[in-house]
Amino acid sequence: MPELPEVETLVRRLSPIVGARIADAEILDGRLEVTSNMLIGASIRDVKRRAKYIVIGLGERGDLVVHLRMSGRLRLDRTEDEIPYTRMILHLDSGDSVYFINPRRLGTAALCPDGFDRNLGIEPIHSEFTPDILDDFVTASRAPIKQLLLDQRKIAGIGNIYAAEALWRAKIDPRRPANSLHSTEIAALHDGITSVLFDAIEQLGTTIGSSVSDYRSSEGSGSFQNRLAVYGRENEPCERCGTSIERVIQAGRSTCFCPACQT
């Protein structure tokens, strides 16, 4: 599933549509909670990311909210192999078109007339996300630290890939109770979270696989997969200490970590 860096990459590439008006809208999937009449004539005030959601502000019409789920993407272009999987097209008076490509049909699009409002936590790439804020979350929870990082009500946008990578950077075992971390570990984890997210954004995100269902930006595949330290590297040597990476299941999801240098 696209996580914060992948969604942020797509949102930044949509900046040219701000100020344009939706001249026509093709809704090609009846599962989407939006109709052409809801969108035609609306002006695009802004395009933002909130957690893993793309939020297109349409002024008095409300917010068009897209969640990419496992395989979705929202772009100003598409490849030939993406044409059959295009579920919505917004034709703009600027001459641009916005394509919602959704191969597995798990992604969603809905118009929120009163604006997008979800019980989501702090954005980890914003300045408000400080070590002290993270300390408050960590010391109040007995959950395994990786599960806490995935709690969107606390920290918005981190998923399985970047939680594992942040914990590796901080040298913290993902299974440890959150409130067992001491202050220097919390500071290291804060640095691990912010550094891995900004590094991944710079690399246009992570692309695992090469099928039409796999994430890609307007420039093509992301490249952060070439810098993953633990995610998807079970039985490979840790690049820091050489120990074989192990995989465990936490709350039904795979977690890869180094058993030697993550303590």
Image (spheres, rainbow, N blue to C red):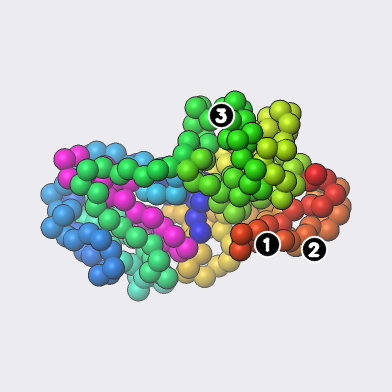
Q: CA distance from mark 3 to mark 2?
A: 35 Å
Residue beneath disc 1: 249
Circle 3 crowding by C-alpha within 10 Å: few under 14, some 14–19, many from 20: some
| Image mark for residue 77 | none
Question: Can you say whether 237 is above or below 83 in the image?
Answer: above
Circle 1 crowding by C-alpha within 10 Å: few under 14, some 14–19, many from 20: few
Camera-nearest residue between 229 and 184? 184
Instruction: Give the residue type at disc 2.
Output: Asn
Residue beneath disc 2: 235
Question: Can you say whether 154 is above or below 253 in the image?
Answer: above
Q: Mark 3 or mark 2, which has the lower sequence index?
A: 3
Residue located 85% across and 49% down the image: 260
Let me know if residue 62 is in the magenta part: yes
Which one is closest to the eye, mark 3 or mark 2?
3
- Residue 89 falls in which quadrant of the image? bottom left
Residue 21 visible to an observer of this rendering: no
Let me know if residue 190 is in the magenta part: no
Instruction: Give the residue type at disc 3.
Output: Ile
Magenta segment boundaries in residue numbering: 55-79
Locate residue 47 relative to residue 167 in the image: left or right.
left
Residue beneath disc 3: 133
**Marks 3 and 1: in contact by CB < 8 Å?**
no
Q: CA distance from mark 2 to mark 1?
A: 15 Å
